[in-house]
Image (tube, helix red, strand yellow):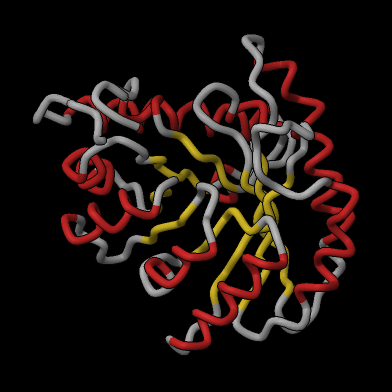
Amino acid sequence: MTARLSSNFDYVAENIEEVRKQIRAAAERSGRDYNDITLMAVTKTFPAEAINAAFKSGITLFGENRVQELLEKLPQLDMTGRSAHLIGHLQTNKVKYIIDKVDMIESLDSLRLAKEIDKQAAKVGKVMDVLVEINIGMEASKSGIPAQQLPEFLDALKEFKNIRVKGLMAIPPFFENKENTRPYFAEMRKLFVDNMAKKSDNIDMTILSMGMSSDFDVAIEEGATLVRVGTKIFGKRNYTGGN
């Protein structure tokens, strides 16, 4: 269920400007180029009107966690020059519904899912960009493969002609003190760098997607190239009345 927000979305523009300032500051602190970092607006529970307001403020990429929400919102969005990523856990039986609707799937976490993405992408004549999701904190509540399995997993993915691996994604454990996430982000950066050399016809790792509203500045300092920000753009989510 989408969050109940005011019909006046002026605050979205202000929030995006503030987030961009924080991204720029984090980039400067780490000696990085601000333009090398992509800001994604994460839109779970937020209505299409809020997303269109973000688009008007320069956002060109949004990420949706749930297939059903994505399908409901897309017809209401001005997608000209914009991209959509599926960032939540994806069930194999739902791949066919979004294969021609998104530009990237950031949550590839099994060979079974890879096979289905490859199969459905072939049907529509598409090569689907994907990120491999890493369960960097080894949390039972989160999806993703263990970090130590990544080399073997990448080797197995080489057989799929309709998948292109563009990098890695991770959601580290949540801490009240965001500095506690730093070791996890640093580990992800090392994993990313160590496996960048594994290039093949369908593996070209250039994207490290990590960092959310609570810790994206730390993630940038540790090497994130894409940050996923929701509440700092749209406000607190309202889950009243459903998930």
Q: Position of residue 34 (x, y in %)?
A: 56, 42
Relative to 107, residue 92 above or below: below
Q: Residue at x 73, y 31 (%)?
A: 139
- Residue placed furthest toward the front: 93
Q: Residue at x 68, y 55 (%)?
A: 109
Q: Residue at x 50, y 79 (%)?
A: 120
The quarter of the displayed image where residue 47 is located: top left
Placement of the N terminus among the 4 image quadrants: top left
Q: Left or right of 34: which side holds 59? A: left
Placement of the C terminus among the 4 image quadrants: top left
Q: Position of residue 118 (x, y in %)?
A: 59, 79
Q: Residue at x 40, y 25 (%)?
A: 232
Instruction: Out of 225 and 24, give the one closest to the viewer.
Output: 225
Q: Position of residue 72 (x, y in %)?
A: 23, 54
Q: Left or right of 186: which side holds 106? A: left
Relative to 224, residue 68 above or below: below
Relative to 95, residue 127 above or below: below
Q: Left or right of 150: which side holds 212? A: left
Q: Position of residue 40 (x, y in %)?
A: 45, 45
Q: Left or right of 160: which side holds 183? A: right
- Residue placed furthest toward the top: 176
The quarter of the displayed image where residue 116 is located: bottom right
Q: How many marks?
A: 0
